[in-house]
Amino acid sequence: MENVAVVGASPKADRYSNQAMRMLEENGHNPIPIAPAKDEILNRKAYPSLRAVPDRVDTVTMYVGPSRQAPVLEDVIRIRPRRIIFNPGSENPEEYDRLRSTGIEVVEACTLVMLRTGQF
């Protein structure tokens, strides 16, 4: 089971981040909601930041736009997950080389499509 931090997780069922959390769980992964304004999402403890997560994070899947990513990306570099997925709307190519230089795999893709097609 892979620990997957969902940055920008939402309790709203129509949001892609919420759908990703549900699909990650259905596929045997452990989704970890990162949402500063929430205590819990889909019966899972929500964390205000990546650095607040007590467990190892294997993958970060990004659902916030580039204008809100600076502190998140600093945390990504600090916790060093295996990879980070930039979902549509969250792409931030100016940061990719910096992330890759720390050994983090950078993927520009849709988490939902990756899960549906067995590419996750």
Image (spheres, rainbow, N blue to C red):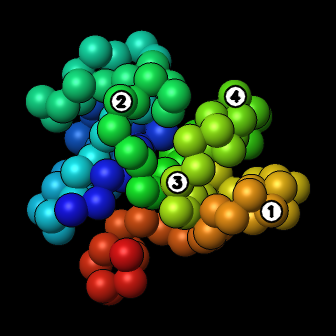
| Residue 101 badge | 1
Query: Callout 1, which amino acid?
Result: Ser
Residue at figure coordinates x 75%, y 65% from the top left: 100
Which residue has dot 3 on it? 81
Q: Depth check: 108 or 57 in front?
A: 57
Which residue has dot 4 on it? 71
What is the crowding at mark 3: few (fewer than 14 residues within 10 Å), some, or many (at least 20)? many
Which residue has dot 2 on it? 54
Name the quadrant of the C terminus.
bottom left
- 39 is higher (above) or lower (below) than 32: above
Give the distance between the C-alpha atoms of the residues marked 4 and 2, in whole angstroms: 18 Å
Query: Callout 4, which amino acid?
Result: Pro
Mark 4 vs 2: CB contact within 8 A: no
* Direction from residue 99 to residue 17 in the image, left or right: left
Residue at figure coordinates x 41%, y 48% from the top left: 57
Give whichever of discs 3 and 2 has the lower sequence position: 2
